[in-house]
Structures are given as C-alpha cells and as structure tokens.
Amino acid sequence: MKIGIIGMGWVGTSIASSLLLRCDVRELYLNDVRGRVAEGEALDLAHAAPFLRRTTVQATTVEQMLGCDAIVIAAGRNGTANESRLDLLRDNAAVVRSLGSALRSYAGLLVMVTNPVDVLTRVLLEETGLPPARVLGTGTLLDSARMRHRLGFELGVSPQSVHMHVIGEHGNSQVAAFASARVGTLPLRSWPGWQREREADLAGEIRRSAGEIIARKGATNHAIGLATAYLLKWALGDERRVITVSRLQEGAAGLRDVCISLPAVVGRLGAQTVLEPELDDAERLGLERSATILRDAYAKLKQGTA
C-alpha cells in the first residue's frame, strides 16, 4: 500500500501516524509547502521503524506521489472557534486549485480532508476531471463516529453496536438520521426507554463538538486522523464497507450536482454505490436544506463572491 499526504499540519501529521500504526502501509510520502516541515515529519516518523511494519517514509513532491494507491489532501488553514467550516472556503479553495493540474493524470483514490470538505471535494473533482467515485471527502464519517460514541454512552452499549449515520454537510446543516438508526438489530426509536425528545439535543451536541475541541486546543486532529486511516485501510483493502463519505451525488436521495455525505459502499475503486437511508420527513427536509447550502456556497465560490 502506497499513500501520499499533502499538508503536514496537525491533521496531516495525525493521519500519517495513524496510518503507520493501523494500516499495512509500505510506502508513505509526505508533502507540505513548508518543505523542511515535511522532511522533519518524515524523519521523525521513520525513526519509529523498529516498532512498526517495514515502511518507507519520505518527503516528496506532489508529482512524485502519482504512483500512490491513494493521496490525501490535508493542506490549508484550520478554522477558529468562531468560524464555520464554510468561512474557510475562499482560502482553502485556492490551495486545492493549485494542486489540481498536478493530479489530472492520477489513477488512484483522492481523499479530501481539508475543510469545508464537501465544497472542496467538488473543487478537487472539477480541477482534476477524475471520475466522481474516486474523489472522496471524509465528510460526515467523523460526525457519524461521534454520534455512535455518544449513543453508546447514552444507552450503555458498545459504540460498535450502534449503527447510525450523520449525513449531509460536514458542518452546521448536518442531519442526524435517527429514523434509520439501529442498536444491534433493534430500531433506536424502539429501544426501551428511548425518548425522541433527546434527539435534537444529541444532534446539536455532535454538531458543536468540533468547535468545543477547537476552543480548547486549537484544532481537531486525532479522531479525524484515525478516521481517515481506517477509510484508506477499508478502501484500499477493497473491504466494501458502508460508510458515510462525501462525493458528487448523481441521484441518490434525489440529490444531484452537489458533493455531500450519504452512506456508500467504499472499495478500491472508491464510492461507486451510494445508498439512500431511511429518513423521516424532517430529516429529508434537513438533507435538502443542507444540499442547498452547499450548492450555494459552491456557486458563490465560482462567482468569486464567497
């Protein structure tokens, strides 16, 4: 498994260390506009070789990554506690556009992590011209994990036994799909003692969680690093797991012309099959609203008014 990471800030560094610990990576290539930072991270990680699988870690150019099985884009600036993810759009879109020409001939999987991840996934897709299935954003993968963790604690069960997707924007308009949630084989709304009045509070808690972390330590990095590592492990291992990722939608849940998160079967060729979750009326309206917000943000970026 050969993987490249562009952007060696908090998130890129966490992705790199998670990949080395959790995945069978044989070659790991690092890149950053600050060349010496990428070199330093490569040296630091390479010194862990006695504790890891046999892996080569080195700093390279983007062009030298084109032989990788997957390239992760974590380049761009982080947000502050007072910014929404969409507030980052103009600055980080410029970074993604600058990478587009170098990646147009790429034959592997592109994974966008930089925020606002949904709109930047669309920018990356447009700039590279690659098939939509192979240009993914981590989207609400982490939001879904946060919700599973929170529900597991609430219900007194393992998070691994909670099957639930947070869909839509990785941001303020995200939708917690309680209508299709399961605990084991039992619908969440049939769980003994479950109170639907709790759902809005739980959804809000998950929506605010990144801001709470940023306010305390300046960035979120460990959980998204691990989530991205597992996404790559499952995809490149062709495990065909159903996970929530952002990609250009072509009709699932009635959505088109927007990169947004829905559950998808993810394998080595990307997210080729998108699934439509069971939603109640309020959740469906929320998903449509989320799509509208992302389309508008992309349109404003194209018009230069973002």
Image (cartoon, rainbow, N blue to C red):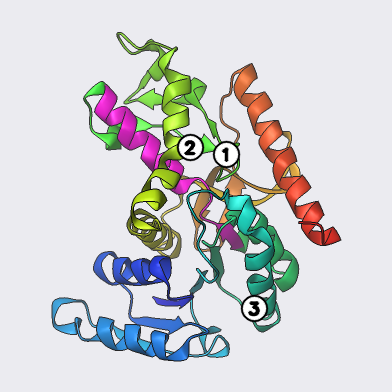
Question: Between marks 1 and 3, how big is the CA–CA gap?
Answer: 27 Å
**Nearer the viewer's eye, disc 1 or disc 3?**
1
Residue shown at 38%/90% (left/top)? 39
**Nearer the viewer's eye, disc 3 or disc 2?**
2
Question: Between marks 2 and 1, how big is the CA–CA gap?
Answer: 6 Å
Q: Earlier in the sequence, mark 1 or mark 3?
A: 3
Instruction: Identify the disc placed on residue 207.
Output: 2
Answer with left or right where residue 81 lies relative to residue 39.
right
Instruction: Identify the disc placed on residue 99.
Output: 3
Residue shown at 34%/66% (left/top)? 14
Question: Between marks 3 and 2, how big is the CA–CA gap?
Answer: 30 Å
Q: Was residue 145 drawn as part of the magenta stretch in this picture?
A: yes
Stretch of the chain drawn in magenta: 135-154
Q: How many marks?
A: 3
Give the residue type at disc 1.
Asn
Instruction: Identify the disc placed on residue 172.
Output: 1
Counting from the top left corner in percent of width and height, residue 212 is at 39, 44
172 w.r.t. 22: above or below: above
Q: Quadrant of the C terminus?
A: bottom right
Counting from the top left corner in percent of width and height, residue 272 is at 60, 53
**Mark 3 residue element:** helix
Q: Earlier in the sequence, mark 3 or mark 2?
A: 3
**Mark 2 residue element:** helix
Q: Earlier in the sequence, mark 2 or mark 1?
A: 1
- Residue furthest right as drawn: 303
203 w.r.t. 106: above or below: above
Q: Are marks 2 and 1 in contact (CB under 8 Å)?
A: yes
Q: Quadrant of the N terminus?
A: bottom left
51 w.r.t. 204: above or below: below
